[in-house]
Image (tube, rainbow, N blue to C red):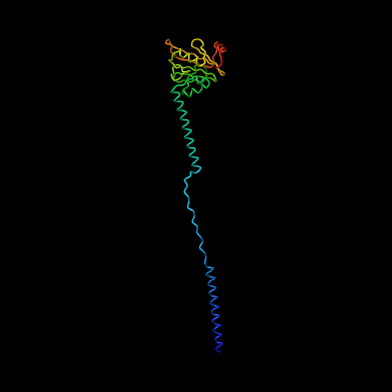
Amino acid sequence: MAEMEEAMKRKSMMVAVLMASMVLGACGKKTETSVVEDPVVSEAPAEETTTEETPTEEASSGETQTGETTEEASNEAATGETEQSTKGVDVGDYLENFGELKNILQMTTTECWQFPNAQSYVSDGFYLEWQGETFSMKNEGNQAVALYGIHIGDEAGASGKAMTDHGWTAYQYGGYIMQTDKAQYYMELESDENGKVTSWYLNNWPEGDITEAYDSLEKQ
């Protein structure tokens, strides 16, 4: 009897131990499943501050600089023409591009004196008129306009030498002639009783008997 009771006690203890093991095992699994690792939170990189200009800003800056450059070039060209007209112009340099004298000397329109319906301009006693490719010009007092260095008031003798030094040939009563591959020219000096130049006349369309004189000239 005592043995049976002892056996029952041992059995009861074993059942208790088994039940305890089962409970502990279940708790361990619950704890294991409930553990969740905290996600790793990475810090976003700090935004970099940039000072680069956008394409629009660069283009705008470029347009401004281009505009300023163009304006400066225009101002320099205008200043150059003004300085040239102030210092003086030698029309001997403009026999082929005579039309440029209008802007260089800032000439204004005047009545025609050589050709009907021509383009006629004047600047302080210097006259320029053209029709197509033919022109006439005369200087009746503009000290800023010279012809091969000849100014109004210069010695007529020295002025004649200046003409021949530049390839012109003397032709009757203060006249001079020259021809090139492109045109024939006639020039005439007027002087006073003191031998001073009072005016001069020049054209590129000689007519009449004078044209025969060009036959003996060599082209310059």
Q: Is residue 144 left or right of residue 6?
A: left
Q: Position of residue 165 (x, y in %)?
A: 50, 15
- Between residue 39 and residue 2, name the one nearer to us: 2
Count of marks overlaid on the render = 0
Q: Is residue 160 above or below residue 74?
A: above
Looking at the rendered image, the quarter that the N terminus falls into is bottom right
Relative image position of residue 171 (x, y in whole percent): 51, 11
**Residue closest to the eye, 33 or 54:** 33
**Location of residue 147 with respect to 12 vertically, above or below:** above
Which corner quadrant of the image does residue 14 belong to?
A: bottom right
**Residue positioned most to the left:** 194
Q: Position of residue 146 (x, y in %)?
A: 46, 18
Q: Position of residue 62 (x, y in %)?
A: 49, 38
The extreme bottom residue here reads: 1
Q: Name the one closer to the observer, 128 or 171.
A: 171
Q: Nearer the viewer, residue 217 or 126?
A: 217
Quadrant (top left/top right/bottom left/bottom right) for the C terminus: top right
